[in-house]
Image (tube, rainbow, N blue to C red):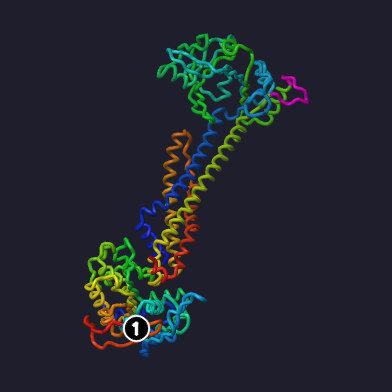
Amino acid sequence: MTATVLSRSALDGAPPARGMDDADAAAVAQGTPIIRLRGVTKVYGQGQAAFQALKGVDLDIDSGDFVAVMGPSGSGKSTVMNLLGCLDTPTSGEYRFRGLHVERLSRDQRARLRRQYLGFVFQGFNLLARTSAQENVELPLLYRGQRTAERHRAAREALASVGLAGWEHHTPAELSGGQQQRVAIARALVTSPAVLLADEPTGNLDTQRSREIMDLLCTLNRERGITVLMVTHESDMAAYAKRVVHFVDGRVDSDWRQNSAPRIDAGRGDT
Amino acid sequence: MLLNTLLLALREIRRNLMRSFLTILGIVIGVAAVITMVTLGNGATRAVQDQISSLGSNLLMVLPGQRLGPGMPTAGAPLFKEADVEAIASQIGGINAVAPEVRAAVTVVANGRNWSTSVTGTSNAYFETNNWRIAGGRKFEDNEERAGAAVCVIGETVRRELFGTGSPLGEHVRVKQFSCEVIGLLASKGQSAMGRDQDDVVVMPLHTVQRRVTGNQRVNTLLVSLLDGSDTERVKASLTDLMRERRKLADNEDDNFNVLDTKQLAETLSGTTKVMTMLLGAVAAVSLLVGGIGIMNIMLVSVTERTREIGVRLAIGALEREVLLQFLIEAVVLAALGGLVGVALATIASIVLADVMQIPYLFNPTINLVSFLFSAGIGVVFGYFPARRAAQLDPIEALRHE
């Protein structure tokens, strides 16, 4: 499947919510960022126990970018990923995804948006146990209501694209950690998402497997134009990204762009 | 969408076969118990009705004593006389036959074998009033009845116990101190409604029993069978009047005898078995309810256990109601599956138990359908709470769940 087919189906496929298409068209046409955060705060708890995880974040992410989000624990990087993934809403501020005000959407509207535009890869893989790779990858398509034959074909292609052709009928228990994460990536890819959110995708893998997964993400970013947002605390892994955003104490601390192609010996000092 | 959700639910059930089986066990037992109880109860009711009609479709039994309970003579109430039989036969219209009955427990001996049974002293009319057919041999002759000859007609059970496979006709059996010739064999009737073996009987002329067994002139029971189409209530009324007159009861005295009619008896007894059926069915229904709670229990555990999975589903874009529907359908499919297995189990159990209890197996489509639908309904009711809990999970929390 070519990148053009993928991106077209992402735009033309059953519109998740009315009015979203117009916003898409406008956003894409004008080359505005696919993601735009303005003055975003997030407070957990109330009163004395209240904890401000984000203290006013402004962030623009362009379509086709590869962004690594870094920062010490408690810096708000996970919170910002949950917001970007439309799993949560900000306490105040504005989050526009393709020009759409995510902070104004209901729970179900956000679910439809995730189903249509977002793919998730987790640190712990989160595959369904005792379920074949094929069926795991088909899961998002089931929620999209696709036909059986179409589902099977798409799932096989997605598995092939992560190098797991022939492994369709293995259950997670029969796969290595690296292979499980590939299945998880295939599951995220199968809907041809605009944005792939990866939360410490290499956290449970050894160096060799980690590199393979990072290479795969780079390829997807380069060849299919998928925007990749990745949380990581390893600078080795962040080195693969085109852009690195550091969070400290709920704010963007630094934000720089790496100009060369991905490399392993990034040589950048740890933060 | 619904089809997809059904697919997801079935996949889930298949994924956890053992747990699914344990989950539905309560429903299986509940449904099986309800259907079996009701089916057997209906069979028992039918058996009671059948056997009472085999007693004589329209029989009146006149028993001494006040109406305290069926057939319980009150102390002091006089028994009947042989003359009462003739009086009833000649003075009351609409009746087919009248027979006296004297019963006594005896031991009969033949071929060196003993058998404890009861002897009935009566007339030839008895075979008519009580629907007995003669399978072999003959009834009594008039002179045998008058003279109290030592002859008897025996039931199938007595024949089997004393003569094995041989024919009893012309053989002699010893009853108490006298020897008695077997002149006839009764066709088998089987067990009575109360579980008594009706074929365990020796029938002799009334005079024979009175003189040689009981040693008095009394008659315990009068049996009156009605002609087809005669009015039971009217015959009963004139029978009561006649007996009051013959027993010289003053107007202010209560009856010291009792007229039972088999139709009424049938209604009373089948009414009792129907009530029993309902009670047993109700108890079984409680177990079905408990089975439903079992489903809720397991579903709640399952939701907790699958929290991360639910988180993944929500993250990749499952709507709240899709998750709700998935778990609800899972519960309903499980419960309905349990219902189906329960119906199958009940059918086998009913057939086997009906055979053991010697009652007819009556397939009752209503109770099968109702139980099945009820089990599916239980899935909806008890599956809703866990399903809602799953649907309302926060995806972030759910993904973090260990």
Decide which of B309, A111 is in the foreground and name it: B309
Please provide percent x and percent y for residue B273.
56, 37
Magenta portion: prevailing SS class: loop
Residue B226 shows in this picture: no
Residue A258 shows in this picture: yes
Instruction: Indicate the quadrant where residue A109 lies.
Output: bottom left
Determine the residue positioned at 44% across, 54% down.
Answer: B336
Decide which of B397, B393 is in the foreground and name it: B397
For mark 1, what is the residue?
A246
Q: Amino acid at mark 1?
A: His
Decide which of B112, A122 is in the foreground and name it: A122
Q: Is residue B194 left or right of residue A66?
A: right
Residue at mark 1: chain: A
Please provide percent x and percent y for residue B369.
48, 50
Residue B358 higher or lower than B207, as above or below: below
Q: Is residue A64 left or right of residue B262?
A: left
Q: Secondary structure at mark 1?
A: strand
Verify whether residue B255 appears in magenta.
yes
Q: Is residue B4 left or right of residue B253?
A: left
Determine the residue positioned at 48% across, 54% down.
Answer: B293
The residue range painted magenta reads: B245-256
